[in-house]
Image (tube, grey):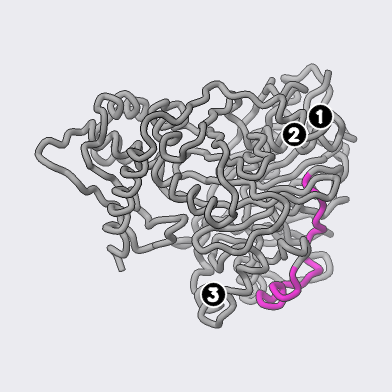
Amino acid sequence: MSVVVAIDAGTTGVRSIAFTETGKPVGSSYREFPQYFPQPGWVEHDATEIWEAVLTTLGELASMLDEPIAAIGITDQRETVVVWDKATDQPIHRAIVWQDRRTAAQCEAWTEAGHLDMVRSTTGLVLDPYFSGSKLHWLIDGDHITVGPNTAFGTVDSWLVWKLTGGKAHITDPSNASRTLLYDIGQLAWSEEMLDLMGVPASMLPEVRGSSERYGTTTPGLPIPAGIPISGIAGDQQAALFGQACFAPGSAKNTYGTGSFILMNVGQTMPEPVEGLLTTVGWTLADGSTTYAMEGAVFVTGAAIQWLRDGLGIIDEASEIGPLAASVDSSDDVFLVPAFTGLGSPWWDPYARGTIVGITRGTTKAHIARATVESMALQSRDVIDAMASAGGVSVESLRVDGGASVMELLLQIQADQIGVPVHRSAITETTALGAAYLAGIAEGVWSGTDEVSAAWQSDLVVEPTGDRSDADALHARWLEAVQRSRGWAG
């Protein structure tokens, strides 16, 4: 019996988890690393500190394990830019994090110059500081780094593979490459046109390999044995889609966190760009097949519950929201649009602001609580409807995880709104599990996606109930409330 280790390098910390051949976690270690904010809107990491967190968690995890490690998979915060010197093995600038907004003016300039259509059709993305390309342009064009023959660029996965292999592999996978603004997701290759636009030399780029294949083995001197295959990579949201076994077109996952990322498998043909949504590579397997996904970002879901607790004092603990919302049969035509930082997919309105409409003298905190829970499901329906319309693929099921997924009321409202079953994963760490599956498939621990599908389990399935016309009426009323929130700060 062996285990597969997943390294989940997130935005605030690193978690290393071991999974058995049945997909069950048997050991875990977590370590935070510092965040740096040198100017308002700027967010940076020290790539060396990320690496040190990886070493610490691997060492602690290894001390818990009796079984040998068959493979290592990596999942990571996407879009964050790491630049290092291959000769010295050291970063040459702090990593610029996906949250960083320093390149907003440059992205606006590219848009005004008419490049957006080319960017969308080539990369599936939009011109936004969120993605890696403009950050790399800032480093190079602003002379913050000097590009030489040993200068290497990568997202966090590339940096970790480089360090784990002792500098033998400078690689990434298509899921991470597709978040850089430099990758042609139709041709599955770096785009010369995008490299020219952003002034990035091809010599800096990692080789793009499949999401599930052996990239190298661990070098001596690590807190785990040398010679362990490193065999799986995926960006965090794509890894969660894989970990949720969303292998059929139309299958989708939603993670209810501070906000929500909704991804839907749209098959092996790249869809046309869609206003309000992103197109991304889900993964590429050893047989050469590439799966694409539509992605929508909802900025505020769980954060609205925190606001009820910390901002309004309606609840003392987040766990109170479910019972309070369930204490009334409806929100009594009260709607909360939690556009606290604007609206994300499919609206992309930075000038929208939070709105509560429909309040009467009879409105209670229970009605506001229920309206908050309903907003989480209704925002998710907006994204899923847009995905289904754009991709020509109907959503057949929604697999969910994240903190708010403990609320059965939320899951019932979600099922009623989208009209398909909602399955809550029995394994909460679906992102790490996806990376483990990708690595384990490459090394024969699992035979392929069929075995992963068979192993996937839910601890709750919620079927749609009631009259569909009631759900549609609620959603139509919600859309009226959304319109009242839009453009408020503009």
Within 10 Å of disc 3 (Cα), the crowding (few <14, some 14-19, many 20+) is some
Q: Quadrant of the N terminus?
A: top right
Q: Is residue 88 left or right of residue 375?
A: right
**Residue name at image x 79 percent, y 31 percent:** 223
Q: Marks 1 and 3: which is nearer the front?
A: 1
Element at label 1? loop
* Quadrant of residue 301 within the rendered picture: top left
Within 10 Å of disc 1 (Cα), the crowding (few <14, some 14-19, many 20+) is some
Mark pair 3, 2: CA separation: 39 Å
Q: Earlier in the sequence, mark 3 or mark 2?
A: 3
Element at label 2? helix
Q: Earlier in the sequence, mark 1 or mark 2?
A: 2
User: Is disc 1 in contact with disc 2, using a CB cutoff of under 8 Å?
Assistant: yes
User: Is disc 1 in contact with disc 3, using a CB cutoff of under 8 Å?
Assistant: no
**Residue name at image x 24 percent, y 39 percent:** 312
Tag 1: amino acid: Trp
Mark pair 1, 2: CA separation: 7 Å
Circle 2 residue = 437
**Position of 388 relative to 369 (above/below):** below
Q: Is residue 231 left or right of residue 310?
A: right
Where is residue 455 shown, x and y percent of the image?
Answer: 71, 24
Is residue 44 among the parts visible in the rendering?
yes
Element at label 3? helix
Circle 1 residue = 446
Where is residue 335 shown, x and y percent of the image?
Answer: 27, 44
Circle 3 residue = 106
- Answer whether residue 201 is magenta in the image: yes
Tag 3: amino acid: Gln
* Quadrant of residue 195 within the rendered picture: bottom right
